[in-house]
Amino acid sequence: MRIWITRAEPEAQRTAQAVTAAGHRPLVSPLIQVAPLPSASDRLAKALAGVAALAFTSANGVRAFALLRPLSDRQHPVFAVGAATARAAREAGFATVISAEGDVAALSRRIAAHKPPPAGAVLHCGALEPAGDLVGALEQRGLGARFVAVYQTLPQAPTGELLTALDQQPPGVGAVLIHSPKAAEALAAMLADRPALAGALTAICISKAAAEPLAAFKFARRAVASKPNEAAMLARLTP
């Protein structure tokens, strides 16, 4: 099966490798792109004062932090939402990285359960429009937390290769992988102009939040991964 990968680079290439290893053919055409917020550097420096730990809900947040702050700011322990984010944190130079292997709710539970608990505020470095409220979840658990936006996601035009594949009869892709609500919103905007296309596609979403923007469309099949990770997404390609 030829599978359309909508997530932003550079993760799209990692996903393409996983799709190939699973015996499918990837078509990489991101619908979103990630851009660090240079203006966040001063805000981030101030937000780091008195922080006991950092929290990241995406590898994009890790990379943006690394661009904005020097290596000397890698001394804080990191709580990561999952394996890919944890790997990015280690690659960025963080020595202590703890993965929640789940979603934002799982991350808040993992931080609260850590022994000893953070001795100061937890700083969530994320997107300009974050998916989920990690700060609120931590505060409900009695922990101090704050948030600073370090990157934004922007729409990205589909590639010519993708448009050619979509215009074939039947379409030259059989499934689409949706890794985030933002990518789902971009796909929904595309499908608004091509409503019949959904009926030819299997949509595999990493979470319920990523599936919600696509609820109005009648896909050949729409499935949500049993866990918010890529392996679980690929497992759902088979009914």
Image (cartoon, rainbow, N blue to C red):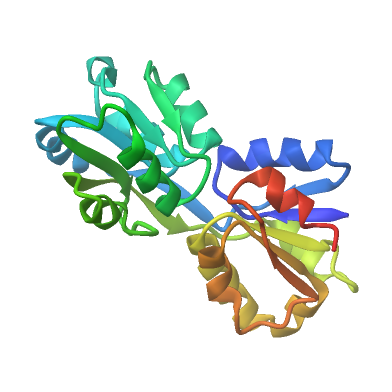
Identify which residue is drawn at 47% across, 30% down.
86
| Residue 131 sits above or below residue 34 on the image | below
Measuring from the top left, give residue 171's x and y in whole percent: 84, 69
Assign the C terminus to one quadrant of the image.
bottom right
Measuring from the top left, give residue 50's x and y in whole percent: 10, 30
In the image, taking residue 65 as reference, residue 104 lies left or right, namely right
In the image, taking residue 203 as reference, residue 39 lies left or right, namely left
| Residue 223 sits above or below residue 96 on the image | below
In front of the other: 42 or 90: 90
Identify which residue is drawn at 70% across, 52% down.
233
In the image, taking residue 132 as reference, residue 221 lies left or right, namely right
Q: Quadrant of residue 90?
A: top left
Assign the N terminus to one quadrant of the image.
bottom right
In the image, taking residue 3 as reference, residue 124 lies left or right, namely left
In front of the other: 115 or 22: 115
Measuring from the top left, give residue 36's x and y in whole percent: 34, 42
